[in-house]
């Protein structure tokens, strides 16, 4: 079957919705309509056309992350502002940048509570964004490949703190980061062959990798700037130009890490980078990290490991033998042949017949197959509802008001089960990696109730968030696409007149599966129609609708209440939990 063959022609509305739901944090109807008229390559070119954003401001409008740390600054507040700033970036960004940045965060996990530095977390996120910009624009050959990102994350200030790389020294190795680098970040264990011997590496390989990673610590001043990235990095513990805590021995790896490129993998200190006396330097220590990553990513399994992460995050969690052979394996080959640049791989996947399920005989497609995360429920809903009369305050306009609004979103996301930038453990957030449940881990009785509560509060003028969604103002705006005929034409169901044309319109706008694609039964549409009226007669609904702008507050209020009924029913439905 032509799994990765590209689709042809323009996307159309349904495929545009699918692409935007998976590669951004949601889109409104105007954006969907624009993408519907594009081909897949044109749509991806627009989604991948992004720029690295400027640094955050505090409530007073001052940037602090690019200034040296001060003794009197409120670092706990600044750490929290980074979270709010990133949520704001997700809301404001129309390209795939922040979705891809969060994906990298789920793969190369860091926990803010452990790092406890707003600058370290900010610069790690900027490291991800800078890499993505360089890769997707094919600029800066010193930092535009995924393998180069992995090399830099090894000496990233936040990571050096999070996984104890700063404690890893010659004669007193700390294997924490080396273990997670192999097990979680790059290649995975594979099946256990014997105690200490896994398919893809051994315990001895962890020890050898730890030696290659010795001698670094974090730079609390953030003044050591990497010329490849333009961002702060950690520093080598050195004295008079000698990396005194780095293990300068030859590191030998097992046959598990052997490849055609490295049939007998070893890390050998580069004599040209050592001191005249043969002692290690910062350059030679980093070169050993570079050698280590090159050895790992010469293995096809490392490429497959990353491609499985991509597939599970963006497409679906289940990887069958068929998917492994026809999707993962060829994408891994593409990744390796393109020198570990991500853009060509993502372009092939996101323009493929498999992603859009356009292959003949496919009945169980991936539209609406993933349970939304709390980010997609909150920010995705706000982005889907955006129109000129409903826009959250940008940070550039009023930082204090922006952060107040983002605070409400952050709190809602946490109540729904995502402790933002505080993953459960080094493996990351369970729904992105934990078998067998994967995305089903988002749903608990409490988390589901909080999803419903978010929608209810969003429609409540007195929610205390600094914003609310006025359904009547929306319905009056051309952006809603609601016509008088749609709202007032009756459909009789079992002797009851209902505004089912209006119901179908709202369902089509907001749910990943629609009645036109046969996933909705007439009974389901009927349910939404009854919920919309909430006991009001159809004749009274029509009267209210036709007089909603007459200046009578009772009529306006009741019309808004019925619209809220419909939006609550649709946006709290099981179907809306999917994308």
Image (cartoon, rainbow, N blue to C red):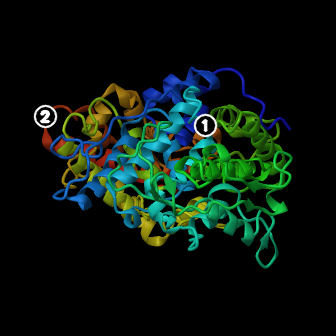
Mark 1 packing: few (<14 Cα in 10 Å), some, or many (20+)?
few
Q: Is residue 192 visible?
A: yes
Residue at image position (47%, 71%) is 445
Nearest the camera: 565 or 470? Answer: 470
Decide: is 458 above or below 163: above
Picture coordinates of residue 116, whole percent (x, y) = 34, 63
Picture coordinates of residue 457, whole percent (x, y) = 29, 55
Q: Is residue 535 visible?
A: no
Res. 70 image quadrant? bottom left
Nearest the camera: 215 or 323? Answer: 215
Give the residue furthest to the front. 277
Question: Taking 524 as reference, is 487 left or right?
Answer: left
Badge 1 or badge 2: first in the primary sequence:
1
Mark 2 packing: few (<14 Cα in 10 Å), some, or many (20+)?
few
The span from disc 1 to disc 2 (Cα, nearest Å) is 37 Å
Circle 1 sits in a helix, a strand or a loop, which is it?
helix
Residue at image position (43%, 42%) is 126
Picture coordinates of residue 77, whole percent (x, y) = 23, 58
Disc ID at residue 442: none
Res. 246 image quadrant? bottom right
Residue at image position (63%, 67%) is 179
Decide: is 132 above or below 161: above
Disc ID at residue 551: 2
Look at mark 1 in the image and give the residue it sits on.
516
Decide: is 168 above or below 26: below
């Amino acid at each position: 079957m032509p799994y990765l063959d590209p689709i042809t022609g323009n996307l159309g509305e349904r495929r545009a919705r699918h692409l935007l739901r998976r590669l951004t944090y949601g889109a409104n109807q105007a954006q969907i309509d624009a993408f519907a008229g594009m081909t897949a390559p044109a749509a991806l070119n627009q989604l991948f056309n992004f720029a690295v954003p400027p640094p955050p401001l505090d409530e007073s409008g001052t940037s602090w992350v690019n200034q040296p740390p001060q003794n009197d600054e409120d670092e706990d507040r600044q750490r929290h502002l980074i979270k709010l700033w990133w949520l704001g970036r997700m809301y404001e960004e129309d390209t795939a940048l922040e979705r891809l940045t969060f994906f990298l965060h789920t793969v190369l996990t860091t926990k803010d509570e452990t790092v406890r530095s707003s600058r370290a977390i900010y610069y790690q996120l900027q490291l991800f964004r800078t890499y993505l910009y360089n890769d997707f624009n094919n600029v800066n050959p010193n930092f535009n490949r995924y393998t180069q990102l992995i090399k830099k994350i090894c000496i990233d200030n936040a990571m050096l703190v999070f996984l104890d790389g700063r404690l890893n020294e010659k004669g007193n190795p700390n294997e924490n980061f080396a273990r997670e680098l192999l097990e979680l970040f790059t290649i995975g264990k594979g099946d256990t062959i014997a105690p200490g011997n896994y398919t893809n590496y051994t315990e001895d390989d962890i020890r050898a990798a730890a030696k290659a990673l010795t001698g670094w610590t974090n730079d609390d001043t953030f003044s050591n700037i990497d010329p490849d990235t333009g961002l702060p990095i950690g520093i080598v513990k050195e004295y008079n130009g000698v990396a005194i805590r780095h293990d300068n021995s030859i590191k030998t790896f097992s046959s598990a890490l052997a490849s055609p490129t490295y049939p007998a993998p070893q890390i050998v200190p580069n004599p040209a980078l050592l001191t005249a006396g043969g002692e290690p330097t910062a350059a030679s220590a980093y070169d050993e990290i570079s050698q280590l990553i090159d050895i790992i990513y010469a293995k096809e399994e490392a490429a497959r490991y990353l491609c499985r992460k991509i597939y599970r995050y963006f497409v679906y969690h289940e990887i069958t033998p068929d998917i492994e052979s026809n999707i993962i394996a060829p994408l891994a080959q593409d990744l390796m042949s393109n020198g570990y640049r991500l853009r060509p791989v993502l372009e092939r996947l996101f323009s493929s017949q498999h992603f859009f399920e356009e292959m003949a005989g496919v009945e169980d497609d991936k539209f609406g197959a993933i349970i939304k995360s709390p980010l997609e429920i909150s920010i995705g809903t706000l982005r889907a509802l955006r129109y000129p009369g409903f826009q959250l305050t940008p940070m550039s306009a009023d930082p204090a008001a922006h952060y107040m609004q983002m605070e409400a979103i952050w709190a809602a996301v946490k109540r729904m089960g995502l402790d933002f930038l505080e993953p459960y453990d080094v493996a990351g957030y369970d729904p992105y990696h934990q078998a067998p449940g994967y995305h089903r881990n988002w749903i608990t009785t409490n988390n589901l109730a909080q999803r419903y509560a978010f929608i209810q509060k969003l429609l409540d003028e007195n929610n205390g968030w600094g914003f609310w969604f006025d359904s009547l103002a929306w319905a009056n705006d051309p952006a809603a696409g609601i016509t008088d005929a749609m709202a007032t034409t009756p459909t009789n169901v079992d002797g009851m007149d209902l505004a089912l044309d209006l119901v179908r319109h709202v369902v089509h706008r907001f749910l990943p599966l629609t009645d036109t694609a046969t996933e909705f039964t007439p009974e389901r549409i009927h349910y939404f129609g009854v919920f919309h009226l909430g006991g009001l007669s159809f004749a009274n609904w029509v009267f209210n609708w036709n007089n909603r702008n007459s200046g009578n507050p009772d009529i306006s209020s009741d019309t808004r209440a019925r619209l809220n009924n419909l939006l609550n029913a649709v946006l709290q439905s099981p179907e809306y939990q999917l994308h």
